[in-house]
Amino acid sequence: MKQSISQMTLVVRDYDEAIEFYTQKLQFELVEDTPLTETKRWVLVRPQNSNGFCLLLAKAVNEEQKKSVGNQSGGRVFLFLKTDDFWRDFHQMKSVGIEFVREASEEVYGTVAVFKDLYGNLWDLIEDRF
């Protein structure tokens, strides 16, 4: 049997501002943006030159969902953006205003820094050592 995780929902405040952040600041590609109803869209983004796994940007529609925007993991690092050139991406992200809350460090597994997305979710930017 072969299985894989293909998507994960990221609850956002607004589709268009989330698309702009992920495509302009993080340089992700917009894979799909399909209207489902007048208020609901199927929006998928992923890092450029990657395959498979996508983030499904889902607009919060009720108070419970709105409370989770920016805090989907209770304040822990939530997502991990793996790169083949840490310093290239680190400097590019800083140049467009991405906020790093933990500066770069060399760890046994690689180079890593923690940044916030537009809503405050924490991400690791990481380049594996091996």
Image (cartoon, rainbow, N blue to C red):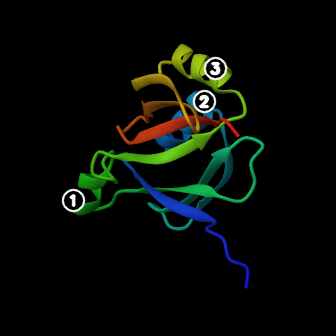
Q: Residues within 10 Å of mark 2 (few under 14, many from 20)?
A: few
Q: Residues within 10 Å of mark 1 (few under 14, many from 20)?
A: few
| Residue 1: quadrant of the picture | bottom right
Q: For the view shown, which residue lies furthest in the bottom direction?
A: 1
Label 2 and label 3: CA atoms lie apart by 18 Å
Secondary structure of residue under mark 2? helix
* Mark drawn on residue 24: 2
Left/right of residue 21 with respect to residue 101 in the rendered view: right
Amino acid marked by disc 3:
Trp
Q: Residues within 10 Å of mark 3 (few under 14, many from 20)?
A: some
Q: Residue at x 30, y 48 (%)?
A: 71
**Label 3, on which residue?**
87
Mark 3 or mark 1: name the one nearer the start of the chain: 1
Image quadrant containing the C terminus: top right
Asked if the residue at tag 1 contacts the one at tag 2, i.e. Cβ–Cβ closer than 8 Å, the answer is no
Amino acid marked by disc 2:
Gln
**Label 1, on which residue?**
63
Residue 99 in view, yes or no: no
Amino acid marked by disc 1:
Glu
| Residue 106: quadrant of the picture | top right
Question: Residue 112: percent from the left, percent from the top?
Answer: 53, 31
Above or below, comparing residue 12 to residue 129 in the picture: below
Left/right of residue 3 with respect to residue 64 in the rendered view: right
Label 2 and label 1: CA atoms lie apart by 28 Å
